[in-house]
């Protein structure tokens, strides 16, 4: 995968509400009603990440989930990160 330029990344971010670009990754966070809801979404994301062979950097504290996506082999953000971000959005929206 080829690393995207900052301009390409910012253009693509316009279609992802709540995502930002910093430090060679795209980032977002979600707040759920409780820990169970947060963990359920994390589990669903984990299965999708395995299917796509692209794993997020994430942190969870009770009902909050922070996610960062970057393609380490490319040294930055690629199309693969946006594919995973879209999958994450679909999972969260379906909750």
Image (cartoon, grey):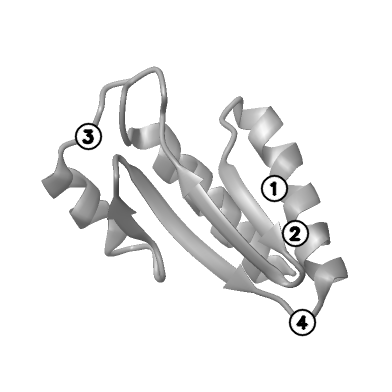
Q: Is residue 22 left or right of residue 47?
A: left
- Is the C terminus in the top left, top right, bottom left or bottom right quadrant? bottom right
Q: Neighbour class for label 2 at 10 Å: few (<14), some, many (≥20)?
A: some
Q: Nearer the viewer, mark 4 or mark 2?
A: 4
Q: Secondary structure at mark 1?
A: helix
Which residue lies under the disc numbered 4?
Answer: 33
Where does the image place residue 83, in percent across and percent down from the top left?
46, 41
Residue farthest to the left, as pictured: 7
Which residue lies under the disc numbered 2?
Answer: 41
Q: Secondary structure at mark 2?
A: helix
Q: Give the quarter of the image for residue 70.
A: top left
Q: Neighbour class for label 1 at 10 Å: few (<14), some, many (≥20)?
A: many
Which residue lies under the disc numbered 3?
Answer: 4
CA gap, disc 3 and disc 2: 28 Å
Where does the image place residue 54, in percent across and percent down from the top left?
56, 30
- The tag earlier along the polypeptide, 3 or 2, is 3
- The tag earlier along the polypeptide, 4 or 1, is 4
Which residue lies under the disc numbered 1?
Answer: 45
- The tag earlier along the polypeptide, 3 or 4, is 3
Measuring 23% from the left and 47% from the top, which residue is drawn there? 9
């Amino acid at each position: 995968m080829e690393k995207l330029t900052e301009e390409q990344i910012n253009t693509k971010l316009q279609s992802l509400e709540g995502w930002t670009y910093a430090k060679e990754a795209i980032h977002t966070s979600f707040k759920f009603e409780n820990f169970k809801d947060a963990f359920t979404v994390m589990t669903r994301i984990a299965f999708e990440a395995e299917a796509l062979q692209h794993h997020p950097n994430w942190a969870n504290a009770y009902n909050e989930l922070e996610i960062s996506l970057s393609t380490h082999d490319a040294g930055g953000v690629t199309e693969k990160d946006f594919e995973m971000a879209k999958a994450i959005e679909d999972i969260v929206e379906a909750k």
